[in-house]
Amino acid sequence: ANAANLDVERIYPFGDAVGVTVSGTFFSQGDLFKPETLMADVQLEGGTLDVAGFELSSTRPVRVQYANGLYRVDDLALAGVGAKLGITGTVAVDGTLDLKIAGTGDLRSAGSPGRDLLWSRGSFDIETRVGGIISAPQLFGDGDVRDIALRTTSGTAVVDDLQARLEF
């Protein structure tokens, strides 16, 4: 089967802040009345991920496989304005996550800096393991932010040349 611009929310609800649209080819085999026998192979030629208004698009085709209640994603590459992400791992039908996400980018592109910040700039590198379940993900990882500059809404001073190592 083929799909073009399929809104994944129709199949699996990610929540209000996340939208996923994909295009590609889907093949499956097995007995629909015996889910443990189902296997599927999906070749996604394109797609978009929208998280709270920040949109990322796939940069190359990706393969997703399904067997034994587990979706496996190998080397999903996404890019948006000033940001790149790579995702590998698994998502179980019960929502259990085991993903690795690596990303690089520019802080200006990472969305609104916050209620008290007028603007920010700098670059980031991050590596994260995502566990838990989709409705309550748990993030573990680290990253670096470099050459940070920011200005608060309450003052005219600019703080710049900050470096930080993040661990979470």
Image: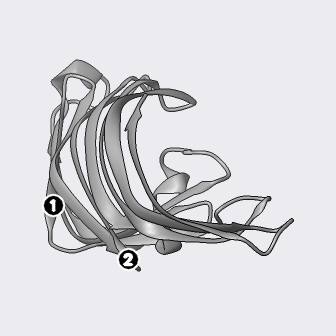
Q: Amino acid at mark 2?
A: Gly
For image coordinates 21% across by 74% down, the residue present is 59
Q: Is the image coloured rainbow, by chain, by secondary structure, or in one colour?
A: one colour
Question: Which label number is shown at residue 28?
Answer: none
Q: Secondary structure at mark 1?
A: strand
Q: Earlier in the sequence, mark 1 or mark 2?
A: 1
Left/right placement of residue 27 relative to residue 112 reads: left
Left/right placement of residue 162 relative to residue 28 reads: right
Name the residue nearer the viewer: 96 or 148.
148
**Nearer to us: label 1 or label 2:** 2
Looking at the image, residue 168 lies above or below residue 28: above
User: Quarter of the image holding residue 127?
Assistant: top left
Question: Which label number is shown at residue 82?
Answer: 2
Q: Amino acid at mark 1?
A: Val
Left/right placement of residue 124 relative to residue 63 reads: right
Q: Residues within 10 Å of mark 2 (few under 14, many from 20)?
A: some
For image coordinates 20% across by 56% down, the residue present is 76
For image coordinates 16% across by 33% down, the residue present is 30
**Measured from the top left, where is residue 143 in percent x and y?**
33, 43
Locate the N terminus by quadrant.
Answer: bottom left
User: Quarter of the image holding residue 91?
Assistant: top left
Name the residue nearer the viewer: 59 or 153.
153
For image coordinates 79% across by 59% down, the residue present is 115
Looking at the image, residue 42 lies above or below residue 33: below
**Measured from the top left, where is residue 141 in percent x and y?**
33, 31
**Measured from the top left, where is residue 155 in percent x and y?**
83, 69
Q: Residues within 10 Å of mark 1 (few under 14, many from 20)?
A: some
Name the residue nearer the viewer: 165 or 74.
165
Q: Which residue is disc 1 drawn over?
A: 62
